[in-house]
Image (tube, helix red, strand yellow):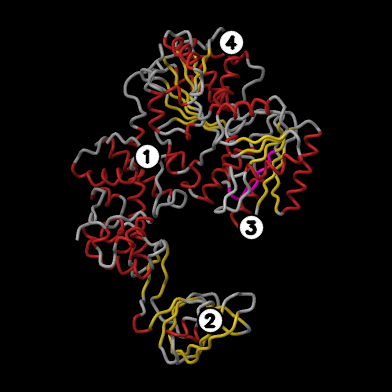
Amino acid sequence: MELQDRITTLTGVGPKKAEAFARLGVETVEDLIFTFPRIYEDRKNIVNIEDLKEGETALFAGAVDAIRPGGFSRGRKSRVLRMLVTDNTGSIEVVFFNAAYLAKTIHRGDRLAFFGKPVINRGRLQVVHPQFEKEKTVQTGILPIYPLTSGITQREMRRLQRLIEPLYPQVESILSEETVQRNNLCDMEYAIRNVHFPSERQHYLEAKYRLVFDEFMTLETGLMASRMNERYEGEGPMFDDDGSEREFIDSLPYPLTNAQERCVREITADLISSKPMNRLIQGDVGSGKTAVAQIAMFKAVRSGYQAVMMAPTEILARQHYEGISRDFDAFGIKTGFLSGSMKASEKRQVLEDLANGSVQVLIGTHAVIQPDVVFDNLGLVITDEQHRFGVSQRIKLKDKGDMPNVLVMTATPIPRTLAVVLYGDMDVSVIDEMPPGRIPIITRCLTGDGARDKCYDFVERQIRQGRQAYVVTPLIDESEAMDARSVTQVYEELAKRFSRTEMIHGAMKQAEKDDIMARFSAGEIDVLVSTVVIEVGINVPNAAVMVIENAERFGLAQLHQLRGRVGRGQWQSYCFLIIEGSSEVAEKRGKIMEESSDGFYIAEEDLKLRGPGEIFGTRQHGLPDMRLADMVKHMNVLNAARDEAKALLEADPHLEKPENAPLKRRVEKLFGEDLTLNL
């Protein structure tokens, strides 16, 4: 048997079972080895029945003294099976619901072992639905509990892990011996063996530390290797050090905040140096990132270069174009627009003007990275809401020029812990100050139909005062699989109540979406029912109410982004989170939203509640799922692994040395096609 053998080579795993394992991502024997337990059950000792304690899960054994199939349980549509189990210290009642079939397999006098949590019922200890097996076959020790899927049992997973245990020594170490010693790590065989079958807690902790380190080492090596494609060697375009940006700043109808001024200084220092800029601007909704980007574009044009901005949606791109072209027209700067929905004749004219240099600033969607888009002298590349673009798209945009300066922007505040992982080699500017005069948005969580009715009564009053409202739902159409309100359902309800109601969602044609948004911006629509298509970039100052249906189905960061669509005008704005059902996480999210408007704090809390994979989406960010590692809990391990990965890639950028081949294979397997690794 070899590590790369198919899972079907194992005894008891046929084609049907292999399909079940495939759902767990297990196709080879090695995949099975790297399917780690999610928790462990301490079954080292069989506890005497007299020593069982309420609420403490334990392993106990005894003889079945009595067994009684009962009638239907109170409040349940299931039959009850009760048995009295006795050892030499005492007796306890064991209860099963909807398990009358057990009366045919369990008999008085049988000796069984049970694993469960005692509870007090009518003054006596009782164990409900424990795991059980014959006493003579009971497994003791620290038992691993694996992630499962339909068709696979825990006993089966443990049996197969024992079957392949002789292969554990064959698992390659991706770390050099120097790295292992420098970081005080255990060896790989010890780690694999003790993560599956630890005999002591300390052995498990040592094993987990090594495997977490390996995961972070693989992650950081992959991310750093991918960023090497976005990094520059040599000199880039140098912009004029003449203070020309002040001409545009002085023309603005408002003063820059201190945070904006700081960002402008940082960006200007990059632009006038020979080293190409590679900078991220993080700023909360409404903090003024676009103005800072405009200042950089203005400086590019005054220095004889072109600039381009790529936005993720046509709505947002057009919004940028309208504002930027209006501002730049006063300075004789020609701004062009490019999107996939344009007429061929319009597109042809823009491409011609771009190539001959008469279009100095281009704003567009991903259409700007198409092969027929040629610049005359591109010096500055800006990506808005950069997390919506893949690495390869950003590289294509950068490659439109000769090592241009790169600025990426995000209105999705990224937790510091993740920013280090995702943008470790970028310079980061943070706009952590809001323009003066913005009125804080009042946020309230609502539950129940009565609260919903009151909410829409409030919306009606706001509309009578001349305001507009967004209503956001998680679904386009009703779904049997998901108990949540849809755009179509909510639209049909609200259209009966509010005469000027429209709906918009991602499945609509672009022209239709653009028309609806234009009418909403013009005040011709009072209530816009939408999916999260309006999450990014829509700016309607008169919209003062945001209602989010099924708010429990959105993450904190997304709720904050949606809330940011209101509060952009002179009016007091409101955000109502309508929550269906109750859960601890939903309640925590609601409380955080009610108490804070700080996007960076909210992002940190979101990371704690949900983890990085759910916040960003692994494919969106090229961030693979971790099996054991947790970026919040294991930050110290992440830092150590990142230092090792950086040193290794500096010495062997393409992992060509034979000793780095195992790490290279692990990186390529982890990332698959999500990243261009250049390895």
Q: Residues within 10 Å of mark 1 (few under 14, many from 20)?
A: some
Callout 2: SS: strand
Cβ atoms at labels 4 and 1 below 8 Å apart:
no
Measured Cα–Cα span from mark 3 to mark 4: 53 Å
In the picture, the disc for residue 329 is 4
Cβ atoms at labels 3 and 4 below 8 Å apart:
no
User: Which quadrant, please, contains the N terminus?
Assistant: bottom left
Query: Does residue 205 appear to the left or right of 415 in the view shown?
Result: left
**Comes first in the chain, label 4 or label 1:** 4
Nearer to us in this view, 452 or 498: 498
Query: Does residue 535 appear to the left or right of 446 in the view shown?
Result: left
**Comes first in the chain, label 1 or label 3:** 3
Callout 1: SS: loop
Q: Position of residue 182 (x, y in %)?
A: 29, 49
Quarter location, residue 251: top right
Nearer to us in this view, 632 or 386: 386
Quarter location, residue 619: top left
**Comes first in the chain, label 3 or label 4:** 4
Q: Which residues are magenta?
A: 546-553
In the picture, the disc for residue 582 is 3
